[in-house]
Image: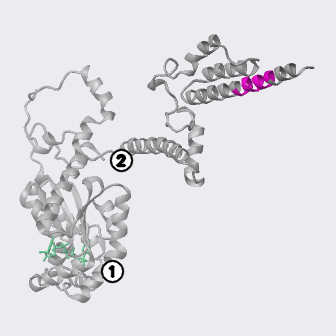
Amino acid sequence: MGAAENKQQQLNKKKKKQNQTQKEQQKQQMQMQMKMRCLSCEDSVIEEHQAILEELQNCPKPLDPKAQSRLQPMASFGPLRRPAWKTARRWLGDGVRGPRFTDVEGHLQKAKEFFTKPALSYPEYKQQCESLRLFAFGGVCGGCVLSLFLFPPKSSYWATWSPWQWAQYVGSCFKAAPALFATEKIETVSYQSILYPQRKVSATVPPASTVQSSPSKPVAPPKPRVLFVLGGPGAGKGTQCTNICTRFPHWSHISAGDCLRAERNDPQSKDGELINSYLKEGKIVPVEITVRLLEKAMQKDMAQGKTDFLIDGFPRNLDNVTGWEQVIGDRADVLGVLFFEATETEMEKRLLGRSATSGRVDDNLESIRKRFRTYEKETMPIVEKYKKQRMVFTVDGMQSVDEVWSHTLTKLREVEAVAVYGP
Ligand SMILES: Nc1ncnc2c1ncn2[C@@H]1O[C@H](COP(=O)(O)OP(=O)(O)OP(=O)(O)O)[C@@H](O)[C@H]1O
Ligand SMILES: Nc1ccn([C@H]2C[C@H](O)[C@@H](COP(=O)(O)O)O2)c(=O)n1
């Protein structure tokens, strides 16, 4: 073999090596481009690219210009890019492939990793956040819908326009509208039957003196409506009840404590002494006595046209609750409990202030503290019981009298709405 031949051989070897490097570089470049594109591609496109790669690998020579031009459009971003709305994974712009949108399990895994596996890179962290966000969003929306369903807002607007009423609207399109004017002569009508047509009319007729009936057609009056008023001693119950009755004359304020004090002061009463001993000790008087006095006071006020009753300071314990159910039962509609909340320090300050003028035997520090204990032990469980039945309308009693009044008004409207539309 001559020197020339040797040189030729070396040249060939070098050329072959050059070809191989060039081919390797081309392959790497293509791989890179395809990797980037695959982030937003469907599996079928990825498979297509895989096939091209294999073709490249098996190709003995570096790509000729023809093959290059065939592969060029594949490698370019433009034509194969998917529209944004079709992109299942979000383009993170950082080379991370997150689970598909529909891959709930994949997202759940990533969301779990947010709490369990520290992310090694920003893109990984971003993906964890994005997966977690899907569940957070779903959870919040679902929670809101469920809570609206379980605890619908107590507003007349909601009661009228909520989605639960839609079926009724559709139905009402096919029914004849009620007559605009009365179709028969009405002898006796209460304003309540106009305002609250949904209210049931009492089966048990209250005392005859309250019934204004025509000789031909007696009309049963509606049941008296009762709102129990509770709160600690000095929370401001009496003050706000007076405000309600001044503004709304159909409401009557009956204070259980006042009834008991009046009975104690009545020299004819056989229970006077017993009541006095209970009041001094801040204890709760047996319900037989209290509920009898309450009923008497209600009957008296109904005779004067009152229809709604604020029963202040009642029911104070379980005995009071059962006594009311046994004696009054469904002869009255209990609308709920108006509950005034205040701290002991504030209530004590108010009661000591009141003691200067009230003349009450229990407005002294010793009795006040005993009343607080009785309230905590016996009355609070009753409030909790009504809370469970979602019958409590709580007023923040810590503000000034005027502010508490404005809050009381809001709550009173809620009571009315619930009475009309239900809880
Ligand atoms: N928001 C208020 N801010 C300051 N003082 C108040 C407020 N509300 C009431 N008071 C005063 O506190 C005292 C107690 O009020 P009130 O008699 O209304 O309480 P109560 O809850 O009915 O008490 P009790 O259960 O002992 O009958 C009264 O002197 C009243 O003027
Ligand atoms: N249901 C009731 C209401 C009141 N009393 C007694 C015990 C109280 O200390 C006292 C004063 O009541 P207040 O005016 O503070 O509401 O009256 C009761 O035994 N049972």
Foreground residue among 44 and 315: 44
Quarter where residue 370 is shown: bottom left
| Image quarter for ligand 1 | bottom left
Which quadrant, please, contains the N terminus?
top right
> Which portion, as a residue range, is magenta?
11-21
From this viewpoint, is residue 49 visible?
A: yes
**Mark 2: secondary structure:** loop
Q: In the visual, does 266 lie left or right of 75? A: left
- Residue at 39 percent across and 46 percent down: it is 147
Q: Predominant secondary structure in magenta?
A: helix
Identify residue type, mark 2.
Phe
Q: Position of residue 304 (x, y in %)?
A: 7, 57
Outermost residue toward the right in this view:
1
* Residue located beneath label 2 in the image: 151
CB at disc 2 and ligand 1 closer than 8 Å: no
* Residue located beneath label 1 in the image: 373
Q: In the visual, does 266 lie left or right of 33? A: left
Quarter where residue 373 is shown: bottom left
Identify residue type, mark 1.
Arg
Residue 16 lies in magenta, yes or no? yes
Q: Is residue 188 above or below residue 9?
A: below
Residue 251's disc is none
Mark 1 closeness class: few <14, some 14–19, many ≥20 residues within 10 Å: some
Foreground residue among 408 and 182: 408
**Mark 1: secondary structure:** helix
Q: Position of residue 166 (x, y in %)?
A: 31, 29
- Residue at 20 percent across and 74 percent down: it is 257
Q: Is residue 416 above or below residue 394?
A: above
Distance between the alpha carbons at the discs numbered 2 and 1: 33 Å
- Residue at 60 percent across and 26 percent down: it is 34
Viewer-side label of 2, 1 = 2
